[in-house]
Image: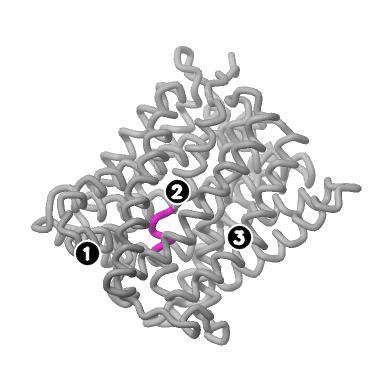
């Protein structure tokens, strides 16, 4: 069987893919709800997590330039079993991630239709239908190949900047003319580090900075990856940091932190600002662009993550069918279809029996823990393979410590939730998914 993949991704495809995949406007909401002190937390996450992440990915993608990225790195450095668990956790986590991302996109899409439809943000039927239609449309387009699929990522990446630009400009003008909606003073800039929930928010910020490894998973579909990957890391990294830090600041200029919604707070803030400047018509355009950028993010993650079970399937630790390449479009179509089927179940499960916001929070907490398990492997691999590269050893050690700390902090229950019930759910979900991977590897390795 032909397993040749087509190299279709250039430098700007990678840059826009990184931006649309990593920049989660919902992370701005999480940060803004903690107040101005989140700016320092963003900078802390940037220095001890995001920068070490970029260096580790640069180093490992050069040493092991193969399709599969983080799975291949763990396999080559620590052995097949560790590689499988890194790949398994990375893949299964994203099956949890898609519903949470799609919920966010669905809530923002309602602003396109008008304020009379905003009540649907609490409708489980609407959220489920929107999520399923978007997800399957994206999967079918990506089966046709990255020649088509990459344009969803690219348009989404461009779509991030315009609404953020509106927020930047109007937010600063509003602060100059009327003062910040959230009072700003020296005390408000200092995060309350004695409050344990502050560190829980910081774990979410690290999660918001994660995702640069996605492009390395597509290594064999990138044009001259040894040159384009490091350039993409630097250029997109600067843009992502600017969006997060200044976006949080202008959100607080636009609205008091206690009034910022978790699912549609970006557009609430833009709507509030455009109304002040009698530019209400801009809200619909911003809503459309945010929806497009969200769909682009879904497409980028679905396209990239599907290559992990594809690579594991080549090694026969998952069914061989997952490694099948479409004879015409040269894409891992079976892996994409299986991913779609499993995500459908997660979407239906996530909206059943709870409010949309409760489901969103449960999914977010679970995915941080599971997603960062492969990151521990990545930073450990970067440290172990650095040899005489002091920067590689430092970035590996610092990144590993920051990731481990973020995983611990993510286990802190959100305010207002039953702590015992939260911990039981979180531990149960983690054990279920990690344990199922261990059992599956044991069965497949015996064969």
Question: Does the magenta run of residues contain 273?
Answer: no
| Viewer-side residue, 419 vs 265 | 265
Q: Pinpoint residue 265: horizontal percent, then vertical percent.
A: 30, 63
Question: Where does label 1 land, which residue?
Answer: 272
Relative placement, left or right, of 62 versus 432 is right
Relative placement, left or right, of 91 versus 226 is left
Question: Where does label 3 land, which residue?
Answer: 46
Distance between the alpha carbons at the discs numbered 1 and 3:
30 Å
At 23% from the left and 49% from the top, the residue drawn is 109
Magenta span of residues: 24-28
Q: Quadrant of the C terminus?
A: top right
Determine whether the residue tagged by mark 2 lies in a helix, strand or loop.
Answer: helix
Question: Where does label 2 land, which residue?
Answer: 95
At 55% from the left and 43% from the top, the residue drawn is 236
Q: Pinpoint residue 86: horizontal percent, then vertical percent.
A: 64, 48
- Earlier in the chain: of badge 1 and badge 2, it is 2
Determine whether the residue tagged by mark 1 lies in a helix, strand or loop.
Answer: helix
- Earlier in the chain: of badge 2 and badge 3, it is 3
Q: Residues within 10 Å of mark 2 (few under 14, many from 20)?
A: many
Instruction: Please name the predominant secondary structure of the magenta segment in the image.
Output: helix
């Amino acid at each position: 069987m032909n397993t040749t993949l087509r190299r279709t991704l250039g430098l700007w495809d990678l840059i826009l893919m990184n931006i649309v995949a990593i920049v989660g406007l919902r992370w701005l909401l999480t940060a803004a709800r903690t107040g101005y002190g989140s700016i320092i937390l963003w900078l802390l996450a940037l220095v001890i997590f995001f920068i070490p992440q970029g260096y580790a990915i640069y180093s490992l993608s050069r040493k092991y330039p193969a399709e599969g990225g983080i799975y291949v790195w763990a396999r080559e450095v620590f052995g097949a079993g560790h590689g499988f668990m890194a790949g398994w956790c990375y893949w299964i986590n994203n099956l949890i991630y898609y519903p949470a991302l799609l919920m966010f996109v669905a809530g923002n899409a309602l602003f396109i239709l008008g304020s009379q439809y905003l009540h649907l943000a609490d409708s489980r039927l609407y959220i489920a239908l929107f999520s399923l239609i978007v997800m399957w449309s994206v999967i079918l387009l990506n089966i046709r190949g990255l020649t088509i699929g990459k344009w969803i990522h690219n348009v989404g990446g461009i779509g991030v900047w315009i609404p953020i630009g509106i927020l930047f400009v109007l937010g600063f003008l509003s602060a100059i003319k009327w003062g910040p909606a959230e009072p700003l003073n020296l005390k408000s800039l200092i995060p309350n580090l004695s409050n344990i929930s502050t560190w829980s928010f910081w774990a979410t910020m690290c999660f918001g900075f994660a995702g640069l490894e996605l492009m390395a998973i597509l290594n064999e579909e990138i044009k001259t990856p040894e040159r384009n990957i490091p350039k993409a890391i630097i250029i997109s990294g600067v843009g992502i940091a600017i969006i997060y830090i200044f976006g949080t600041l202008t959100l607080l200029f636009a609205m008091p932190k206690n009034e910022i919604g978790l699912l549609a707070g970006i557009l609430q803030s833009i709507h509030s600002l455009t109304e002040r400047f009698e530019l209400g018509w801009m809200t619909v355009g911003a809503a459309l662009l945010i929806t497009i950028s969200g769909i682009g993010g879904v497409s980028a993650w679905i396209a990239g993550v599907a290559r992990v079970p594809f690579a594991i399937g080549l090694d026969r630790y998952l069914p061989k069918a997952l490694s099948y390449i479409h004879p015409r479009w040269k894409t891992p179509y079976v892996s994409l279809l299986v991913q779609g089927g499993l995500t459908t179940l997660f979407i239906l499960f996530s909206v059943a029996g709870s409010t949309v916001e409760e489901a969103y929070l449960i999914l977010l907490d679970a995915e941080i823990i599971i997603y960062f398990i492969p990151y521990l492997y990545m930073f450990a691999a970067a440290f172990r393979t650095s040899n005489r590269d002091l920067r590689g050893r430092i970035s590996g050690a610092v990144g590993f410590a920051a990731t481990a700390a973020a995983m611990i902090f993510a286990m802190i229950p959100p305010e207002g939730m039953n702590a015992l019930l939260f911990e039981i759910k979180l531990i149960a979900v983690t054990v279920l998914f990690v344990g199922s991977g261990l059992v599956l590897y044991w069965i497949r390795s015996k064969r």
